[in-house]
Image (cartoon, grey):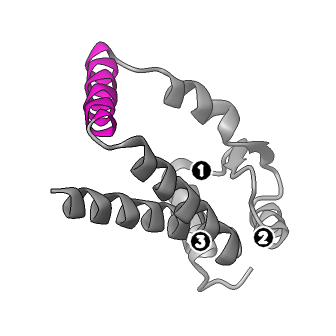
Amino acid sequence: MDASSPSAIALKNVARRLGTPAAIGLADRMWALMVLRFAAALPGARQELASKALSPLRSRKSPAEVAALREAGQAIDRVHASVPGWLRYSAVVAGFAVFMLSRKSIFAGVICGEIVMLSGKWWLG
């Protein structure tokens, strides 16, 4: 691993502050190149999926988080209820078409659907 690479610098800082770790958590879909670099930089460290530790933390919600999510869901339900069905379905169709035409870019599909929805709402008044 190149000593000036971001990975090497990060690993050096971790080792300096905490010592050599017994295990490191790697992203579930990390490039093989990065996995090999971590293995070379920390030969004694066990490599595990970070999701094993992070998933349970992400799935827990405080009562305040649950209330905020419920409120957000109710708000979007109110918005959708005010939009005619034909406009909602048109936004979905347009979004899906852009998704397929843009080499399956979720971002492009969602943006297109939102533009159709907002334009339709504006046009309807």
The quadrant the N terminus occupies is bottom right
Q: Which residue is denoted by mark 2 in the rendering?
A: 37
Q: Nearer the viewer, mark 1 or mark 3?
A: 3
Question: Which disc, if any, is residue 67?
Answer: none
Residue numbers of the magenta segment: 63-81
Q: Residues within 10 Å of mark 2 (few under 14, many from 20)?
A: some
Q: Give the Cα distance between marks 2 and 1.
A: 18 Å
Q: Nearer the viewer, mark 3 or mark 2?
A: 3
Label 1 belongs to which residue? 19
Residue shown at the point (74%, 42%) measured from the top left: 49
Q: Secondary structure at mark 3?
A: helix
Closer to the chain start, of discs 3 and 2, is 2
Q: Which residue type does callout 3 highlight?
A: Val
Q: Are marks 3 and 2 in contact (CB under 8 Å)?
A: no
Q: Position of residue 84 (x, y in %)?
A: 35, 43
Which residue is disc 3 drawn over?
Answer: 98
Along the viewing direction, whichever of 20 and 119 lies nearer the viewer: 119
